[in-house]
Image (spheres, grey):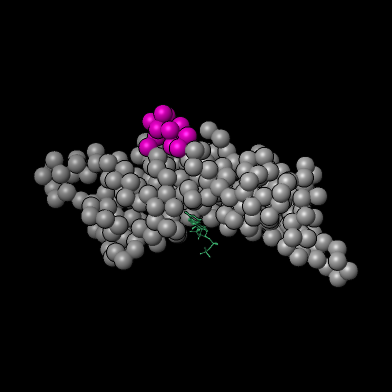
Amino acid sequence: MEEKNLQWFPGHMKKAQRLIQENLRLVDLVIELLDARIPASSQNPLLREILGDKPRLIVLNKSDLADRKSVDAWLKNFRDENIPAVAVDAVKGTGLKSLISHAKELAAPKTNKFARAGAKPRSARLMIVGIPNVGKSSLINRLAGANHVKIENRPGVTRAKQWIKISDGLDLLDMPGILWPKFDDAEVALKLSWTYAISDEIHDLEPTVTKLLMTLAEKNPAGLRERYKLAELPDDAHELLNLIGRKRGCLVKGGDIDIEKVLRLVLNEFRAGKLGRVTLDEP
Ligand code: G4P
């Protein structure tokens, strides 16, 4: 990673962090959206500091792209640490009922407190935060669904905020809180790059994709073999790239492999989940 690419980084991070901090007081709990393929690398350790004792629900999104057993292992891992966690697919809407019931349960101490004081019990309020591309907007849209009821100008709130009623007794702040990924570790940076949480400009395409292929060949070789109709996977990443290039007709004039095209193809197909389910961080 080159230094120059990191220069814009602190400013963005500070601004995003400030926005989350400003809105934190409006909610009873925070959903931390993680990528189920990289539940460790998609965390931002800063969040814990920002949240203080605000209840947090971990939601493993894109669980349709992760290895099933690893999703269960990660959920168990978080729950063993007393952190409530659920797995969802924000595109298909899998797991949302469980997300809603966990969120209500987590907010109950707060909302019940209001009820006991004789005031009208109010809805629980939540906010969704996560690194870029983890699926925040998809989840907000999916939760909003047909129920796109917006409640504006809450009393006591200085600036108008958009709220969406996502179920009886549960309101969602219509603002994806962008957390900056933490990628000072090269290995973490690679995983964030593969899953497109950080821009492709940060890495050189070739080493990024050859390392991805090697990792996939180790973690889910069947996924690669099936996708590219290969009886066997060669040990060498460049050989593999050439094979894929031939199979998929990524050629330049004269019949040589268009390596740039193969690299992009593999990366895009991985991101679209076409190379099989895989989890890249183990608990
Ligand atoms: P963000 O707000 O956190 O930045 O993420 P956003 O919702 O924009 O989602 C980023 C990409 O991830 C989108 O794909 C979205 O469809 C996809 N995505 C979100 N949740 C899931 C999930 O649970 N499973 C799978 N398989 N994909 C998910 P895109 O290609 O950028 O856009 P689109 O053409 O699919 O809309």
Q: In this orientation, which residue lies closer to the viewer: 200 or 12?
A: 200
Magenta stretch, residue numbers: 72-84
Please state if 253 lies on the left or on the right of 94 as rendered. right
* Above or below, comparing residue 55 to residue 210 in the picture: above
Q: At 29% from the left edge and 46% from the top edge, which residue is drawn?
A: 101
**Spot occupied by residue 83 in the image (x, y as percentages of width and height):** 39, 34
Q: Residue 162, can we see it? A: no
Write down the quadrant of residue 185 in the picture: top right
Q: Quadrant of residue 246?
A: bottom right
Q: How many marks do you count on the picture?
A: 0
Residue most toward the front? 231
In the rendered image, the residue lying farthest to the left is 118
Q: Residue at x 14, y 50 (%)?
A: 120
What residue is shown at x 73% (from left), y 46% (from top)? 232
Magenta-drawn stretch contains 73? yes
**Does residue 87 show up?**
yes
Of residue 255 and residue 91, the one placed in the foreground of this image is: 255
